[in-house]
Image: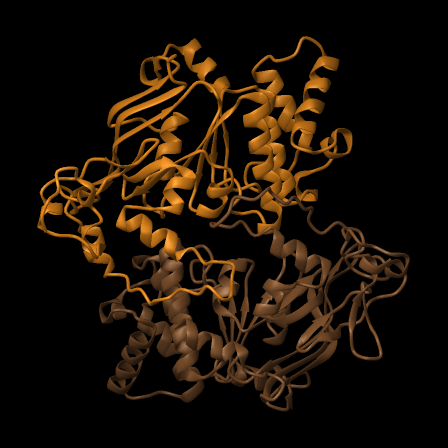
Chain colours: A orange, B brown
Amino acid sequence: MSQPLLDIRNATKVYQVGGGIGSKKKEVVALQNFNLTIADRPATITTIAGESGSGKTTLANLVLGFTHLSSGQIVFQGKDIGEMTHKEIMDYRQNVQAVFQDPFGVYNPFYRVEHVFDLVIKNFKLHKNDSEARDRIEAGLNAVGLRGEDILRKYPHQLSGGQRQRIMMARAYLIKPKLIVADEPVSMVDASLRAAILDVMLKLRDEENISFLYITHDLSTAYQVGDQIYILYQGSIAERGPTTSVIDKPHHPYVQLLVDSVPQPDPDDKWDKDIELPDEEVMRAADAKGCRFYPRCPKGWEHCLTAAPPLYKVAENHHEASCYLYEPKAVSR
Amino acid sequence: MSSQANETTQKDWSKAKSVLKVRDLRIHYDTPKGAVIAVAGISFNLYEGETLGLVGESGCGKSTTAYGILQLIQPPGHIVGGEIQLDDRNLMGLSEREFRRLRWTKLALIPQGAMNSLNPTMKVHQQIADVITTHEGRQPKEKMRKRILELFKTVGLPARIYDMYPHELSGGMKQRVCIAMGIALNPSVVIADESTSALDVVVQRVVAQTLLKVKEMLGVAMIMIGHDMGLMAQMVDRIAVMYAGKIVEIASVQSLFKEPMHPYSQVLIESIPSLKEKKPLKITEGITHDPRNPPPGCIFQLRCPFVMEKCKTQEPPLRELKPRQEVACHLYEVSETGEVKNVAASA
């Protein structure tokens, strides 16, 4: 096998919080011993899912280089991004592009839409002459299902959220990256318009060989477009594997609860039982040594507190869950 | 829970008493280039004890409708016409002073708690006490404390947050504080505006279940505004689909999900991503016309796959095509025997 496109090894990120006068600094582990591999080819959509505070945005920021690892490595095409030279970093930024959650905040309201594209072309020196630049922009807009001239002359406020988000995809596409980090790209767009953006992702994957790191809390869109899925719980992987396999048959108790809680669009299939959340303090005070889901887990036993559970194989195709229930040598309870 | 929920949804709402009647409500937002028609004459009934869902894409006027009912529309928006009746009392003629007395006691709003709906400088118990004292006057401290703790219990909040500030609470807790405030004075109608969006899936389920439980307990009627169709399927009894300021279909949640009749409702139902089957993505555009200048005839004509000549000139009225399923579309004809025929299918 050729070298992977992106290889994250034992990534750990610890934030220091507090430390004002009279208070002690506290450490918050946002990501713990995280491993992820995205193959070079074929291009895939890898979903990172989890609730707020699970570390999914921290992961995006790490991959995009906005923040640095406390320990571990992020290796892109064989090079550790922590040890890149200036030129390599510029290359990396061209190869790894981002699409963010808020399609309103990323535009400067004073400029027309074309400004977004002009800047990209200038900064990455993509064009030989003006007409070639035009053609590239046109091709980029066509790839996301928009038509050129009239949209380029508009101001951001004249576009809908869905259109703005597609323009961001077109911008990322223009640079011909290998990987697009999409952090909640559809969560602020109307449900009925999400399909158009997800469709662009599929098209870029299949036709242009661009891989995606799709970060979301919405399992249903991940189910529709994702290839691999990683479900995080408080900074660690709870379960990972092929998306359909994980969502059709979740193994980790947290993932089971998560999948079960997604409201089904069927009035005859209602939530069958009331669930209770344990007190916030209990949840946060989870013993860092053992399984972090222990305080909420209906199946937990003392064994769970000895050490964080590693990933155990639960099904074919690298479907793994980090739960002692799946420890191979049958542990008697 | 499921069988119980089915019973309530199967109830015959036409026999139930309506608590809130909205007739031909019109709300405009004035802009220098003409008025944006946010709500273009909508009518519906809210029956005793039911939950009515109000759905549609952003900009369709669902929140404006809710704020219109509460008369909380801020300029440049204003109510142009229509009638709102609460327990047979017309609300439109009331002065602001009279209306203030009704808010919270009769008509309560549960806003999106994650947003800035709580005052960051006031402790949780002070905010709830504030609502109560404004309407019922000052009360002994101990009595008030008991009452607030009772409310906490109803919505599943721990007593220890009594003395906390909003920033110390999680999103789900803040939302439940908002629910507690909404029901503090036993209103007869509660309007929940996207009350469970912006929460994590598991927390959302807990809050949604709290809301259902509270509703059941107090027997209030509820209008739920949202765009998550999955959540609607779980929570509401009837559902009204809005498009560009109009209700295009209003039906029981079962009929709407199984047999949506209006082409827009069909698009809406088809575009729900499922967790059960992988299906091809259904791509749709947003509202396409200028809201200042809607086309004559049907409001949905520019996006409708079945558009006919008639749609471009005549506005389809909301008609009851099946029992308790009202649809505003020219596509259906009712014969003298009461049979409903799809014009496009037979042509």
Is A300 positioned to the left or the right of B286 in the image? left
Q: Nearer the viewer, residue A204 or A101?
A: A204
Residue B304 lies, with reference to residue B75, above or below; the image says above
Of residues B78 and A104, which is closer to you in this image? A104
Where residue B133 sits in the image (x, y, percent)? 39, 83
Picture quarter with the C terminus of chain B: bottom right
Q: Does residue A142 appear left or right of residue A325 in this picture? A: right
- Quadrant where the image shows the N terminus of chain B: bottom left
Rendering coords of residue A198 (x, y %): 56, 38
The residue at the point 33 percent across, 57 percent down is B170
Q: Is residue A73 visible?
A: yes
Vertical relation: A187 (above or below) B17:
above
Q: Position of residue A153 (x, y in %)?
A: 75, 32
Residue for point 54% across, 27% down? A205
Q: Is residue B185 visible?
A: no
Q: Where does residue A91 sit, x and y in percent of width and height?
A: 47, 13
Q: Quadrant of residue A163?
A: top right
In the image shown, does B189 or A112 lie closer to the viewer? B189
